[in-house]
Amino acid sequence: MKRRSPLLILALCSLHLTACLMAQQHQVILNLNARAGNQRFDPSQFDEIDRYALQAPASAMETIDTLALYLSKSSPNELGRVRAAWRWITATVSYDTDKKNYSARETLRDRKGTCQGYSELFVELARRMGVRAIEITGYTRGSAYNPGDRVANNHAWNAVLIDGKWYLLDSTYGAGHFNGSRYVREYREHYFLTPPAEFIYTNLPELRRWQLIPEKLSKKDFEGLPFYRHGYFQYGLRQLDGNKSNVISCSGELELRFAVPGDLVLMVSVRDLSGKPLFRPTVTREKEDLVIHAIFQKPGDYHLIGWVNPAERPKDYAWAFTYLVRAR
């Protein structure tokens, strides 16, 4: 048998390595171009997984490895393992109001962090459980945002690949929110695997491809979107008057109309720009619609804020929207 020269062997190895790298690169491109997940998930299907995640013993929370091993036993499929990681993080990690940047390891150790810590911890847990996840950075319109404000590029969240589709989630917003300068822990299901067409109302990634919607938005487009919140999508509201902006101009009298499925109650408040409540507009039902009617006695800028809740749960209001009203 004729022996191959060292140079030939080296060349063949080089070609083989190049082919492997090209194959890996091609696989990455395929993953990045995977379809966006638009499916809505019924939270009740995760009840057992949620209970398991929330019962993690202290011994399982010593390191990222031990926690991932524990959470991975919650489900044999990717969706279930993603849910376990999400639910543990949103139930256990608090936002650090000192706004120190945390690594994934520090976030686990201290049980607190900023959005960077939340998102990095999710990535590390997901990867150890065999699920591909990435951190996304970009602009946000969080609870401190008001219509008309400029958005800041200071937020982080995640995309996760489940059964060949990319989904979006924001565990920082899922865990709680700010009321002024005070952090309030309040779980919000809306930010788990949110359909991209809804997610875009609060989060705009630096890289346009991670919007995961067909028609990409610019920063200016994003700033001008109606400021819909989790309650708007959670309860299926739909604005009917054609307004596509978070700023509304009127001559002193304003009417907004929403299609509202089911027996829902809408509570609305008009406030000055400092947050002081001024009056509550009337809300009337016309068949399947709820109509807001507000009269502004003085010209000026105001915030009109709406909350929605099921009639059978009168105190369970969810923030639905905020508009900047310019009365002239």
Image (cartoon, helix red, strand yellow):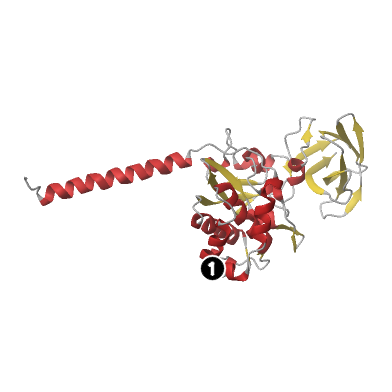
Q: Residue at x 27, y 48 (%)?
A: 17
Q: 134 or 3, which is in the foreground?
A: 3
Q: Is residue 57 above or below residue 233?
A: below
Expressed as whole percent of the image width and height from the top left, the position of residue 195 reads 64, 40
Q: 126 or 253, which is in the foreground?
A: 126
Q: Is residue 116 above or below residue 301?
A: below
Expressed as whole percent of the image width and height from the top left, the position of residue 88 reads 64, 59
Q: Quadrant of residue 237?
A: top right
Give left or right: position of 135 versus 44. Answer: left
Q: Is residue 175 above or below residue 306?
A: below
Q: Quadrant of residue 328?
A: top right
Q: Residue at x 62, y 51 (%)?
A: 83
Q: Residue at x 52, y 59 (%)?
A: 124
Give left or right: position of 183 versus 215. Answer: right
Q: Identity of the amino acid at label 1?
A: Thr
Q: Residues within 10 Å of mark 1 (few under 14, many from 20)?
A: few
Expressed as whole percent of the image width and height from the top left, the position of residue 184 reads 75, 61
Q: Quadrant of residue 172?
A: bottom right
Residue 31 visible, this angle = yes
Q: Quadrant of the N terminus?
A: top left
Helix, strand or loop at disc 1? loop
Q: 43 or 206, which is in the foreground?
A: 43
Query: Which residue lies under the disc numbered 1?
Result: 63
In the rendered picture of this protein, how many numbered marks are placed on residues?
1
Residue 206 visible, this angle = no
Q: 302 or 328, which is in the foreground?
A: 302
Expressed as whole percent of the image width and height from the top left, the position of residue 99 reads 64, 65
